[in-house]
């Protein structure tokens, strides 16, 4: 893990501001979604990318009842019925 040397306070609503330099380097834009992970005492932010709920693939996705599924897994599910 790379230290940035940036320290930010948490405001009264629990928000933090990511510096513009960091957002540029990480290609984060306004309205982008971030996933939040916890690893022991660490909070990890990761840019969210839609992916198949079964295999994690992020191409050829379709929406199925609010979840993403790829064509391959969709076809595999059809075969198993």
Image: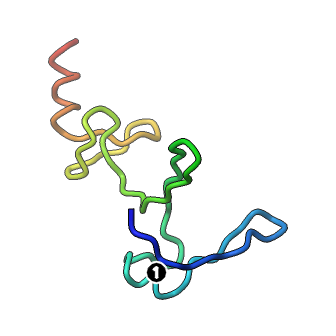
- Quadrant that contains the N terminus: bottom left
Q: Is residue 48 toward the left or the right of residue 7 in the image? A: left
Q: Please give the residue where the numbered disc 1 appears in the rendered image.
A: 22
Q: Position of residue 60 (x, y in %)?
A: 20, 50
The residue furthest top is 81
- Quadrant that contains the C terminus: top left
The residue depicted at 21 percent of the width and 52 percent of the height is 59
How busy is the neighbourhood of tag 1: few (under 14 within 10 Å), some, or many (20 plus)? few
Among the 4 quarters of the image, the one containing residue 75 = top left
Q: Is residue 44 toward the left or the right of residue 70 in the image? A: right
Q: Position of residue 11 (x, y in %)?
A: 79, 71
Q: Nearer the viewer, residue 77 or 40?
A: 40
The residue depicted at 47 percent of the width and 77 percent of the height is 4
The residue furthest right is 12
Q: Position of residue 23 (x, y in %)?
A: 46, 80
For residue 26, above or below residue 58: below
Q: Nearer the viewer, residue 56 or 43?
A: 43
Q: Is residue 12 toward the left or the right of residue 14 in the image? A: right
Q: Nearer the viewer, residue 78 or 22?
A: 22
The residue depicted at 21 percent of the width and 31 percent of the height is 73
User: Which element carries disc 1, helix, strand or loop?
Assistant: helix
What scheme was used to colour the molecule?
A: rainbow
The residue depicted at 42 percent of the width and 62 percent of the height is 47
Q: How many marks?
A: 1
């Amino acid at each position: 893990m790379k230290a940035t040397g940036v320290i930010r306070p948490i405001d009264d609503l629990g928000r933090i501001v990511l510096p513009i330099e960091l957002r540029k380097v990480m290609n984060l834009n306004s309205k982008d979604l971030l996933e939040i992970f916890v690893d022991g005492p660490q909070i990890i932010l990761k840019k969210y990318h839609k992916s198949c709920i079964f295999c994690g693939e992020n191409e050829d996705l379709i929406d199925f009842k609010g979840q993403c599924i790829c064509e391959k897994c969709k076809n595999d599910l059809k075969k198993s019925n």
